[in-house]
Image (tube, helix red, strand yellow):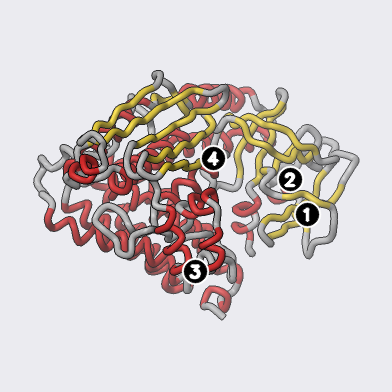
Amino acid sequence: MSAAEALPNDIVAQFRATTVERLGRIEEAWGSLAHGVATAENESELFHDVHTLKGEARLVGFADVVLIIQRLEDLLVAARRRRYRVNEDVDVLVTMAIQFARMLVRKRPGASNGGIDIGGFLKQIEDVLAEWPRQSEGPESNGAASMRPADGGKITVAIRQRLGGAATQIFLEMLVASDRIRLRRAWDTLVGELAGLDAVPLMPVARHHAASAKELAAELGKEVDVIVEGPDLRVGVEVLDTIHTSLLHCLRNAVDHGIEPPSARVAAGKPRRGNVCVKVRAETDSVAVIVQDDGGGVDLESIRDRAAKLGLLSAEDALAAPEATLLDLTFAAGFSVRESAGTVSGRGIGLDAVRAGIERLGGRIGIASTRGVGAIVSFEVPSTRRVVEVHRLPSTQAGLSFAIPTTWTVRSGKSDSYLDPVTVLALRRNEQTTPTVGQIVVTRDGEEHGLVIGGPVSRVAATRIAPTSPDEPLEVVAFGGEHLLLLRPEVFFTARGP
């Protein structure tokens, strides 16, 4: 039995709730420091939060969280010595460390790590920290190693989600207030502001990564032209952050794994200079990004060999595996065709995180390759995260409905206990309650919770009008002129005990 399992449930639940909030502050503070808009107080609070979280995780027995936060602290200390003028690799590592810690904190006892290769990730941080002493620490070291490009005044996702959280609180107050006119005015204003912040330009990010890829090629002794094609599109702020990370990894893989050295290209009858093309295309409700290189293509035989050595496939299955199966293995956690890690890649961390981020948005990613000709990685994501499929749940309070994401299954049946969200959130008014009261169970990945509802369940496509963080239990969405209060069961119930 782990230390976390031996502790009282209420202590573990309090740690989880406090840590989720603390990680949100850490993420926001890092964004402010990296963009040069933080105060000395912000910096002090960041290091206090990180140090406190490390100690609390050790006391409660979340050993994997301790390991992640320890290395995150090392990264932050090194970044502080460089006045937070760090390259994109460090930005991605800090962001991934926060996300991994968040996932591990919410993980139920006995559950898997959700594909997180903790050992490989920690090794990647160690390698980056080992490289830093050889890098300039002066104030002028922010040329090629600058952070992500200026993005037209885009506020950070964390700040935007805090605004969504504020709008949610106003909505809750509006539900029970006797005088709702003032609150309604504040609600309308805040939702309108959020709508205006929803779209930011994409192409500056693509062009920035193209320039960084050329610089990487020069460092590796390769000659590469990187071009970007596509219209000036605007996408949702959360979508932009996913494209930012995905494009970074795809371009680095194309340059490091795909494009051959000049001598090898000439020997193969190719032009001395390699070519990588990024094509951005607008679809009806989505954005497609294609990264195509004219390098050596994916070595399928190396994938067969590594898959067998890593135990991902048996020797027989690896030998018989079709091309599609082998290419899909490049997205597996911890997979790399290289026996040892280099300064750029080979740690098996990258494409698995890319796929996870894209699929979290409801997108998809794939790879195609022709040996000796090149490879194509293409992914498609919604242009905004405005629409979400939900189960609409009439509540026991007249005029109010809840919603549950359709990633959760709703069924009738028995549960150990049932919660009425109206009662839990203190939304009961003296007005008449709904006449129909039922009980349902929501389930996902072995986790289940009982809910009391006031009517039949229906599946609808709702619009996100005030997006909050995935770690927040509530969000307001809209459907057909009705405002629904979205519950995230994995957070809503965790905050109230396992």
Q: Is residue 20 visible?
A: no
Which is closer to the viewer, label 2 or label 4?
4
Up/down of 45 relative to 234, above or below: below
Find the distance from the CA under tag 2 to the CA under tag 4. 37 Å
Find the distance from the CA under tag 2 to the CA under tag 1. 16 Å
Find the distance from the CA under tag 2 to the CA under tag 3. 49 Å
Find the distance from the CA under tag 4 to the CA under tag 1. 30 Å
Numbered badge on residue 422: 2
**Side (left or right) of 78 relative to 467:** left
Type of amino acid under label 1: Val
Which is closer to the viewer, label 2 or label 1?
1
Please report contact status of discs 4 and 1: CB closer than 8 Å, yes or no. no
Residue shown at 47%/67% (left/top)? 308
Q: Earlier in the sequence, mark 2 or mark 3?
A: 3
Please report contact status of discs 3 and 4: CB closer than 8 Å, yes or no. no
**Side (left or right) of 163 relative to 270:** right
Type of amino acid under label 3: Gly
Q: Earlier in the sequence, mark 3 or mark 4?
A: 3
Question: Which residue in the protein does label 1 denote?
Answer: 441
- Secondary structure of the residue carrying numbered label 3: loop
Q: Residue furthest bottom?
A: 1
Q: Residue 393: x and y, percent? A: 77, 41
Numbered badge on residue 364: 4
Residue shown at 9%/46% (left/top)? 138
Question: Which residue in the protein does label 3 denote?
Answer: 311
Find the distance from the CA under tag 3 to the CA under tag 1. 38 Å
Q: Residue furthest right?
A: 435
As rendered, which of 333 and 118 lies closer to the eye? 333
Q: Quadrant of residue 417?
A: bottom right
Q: Residue furthest top?
A: 231
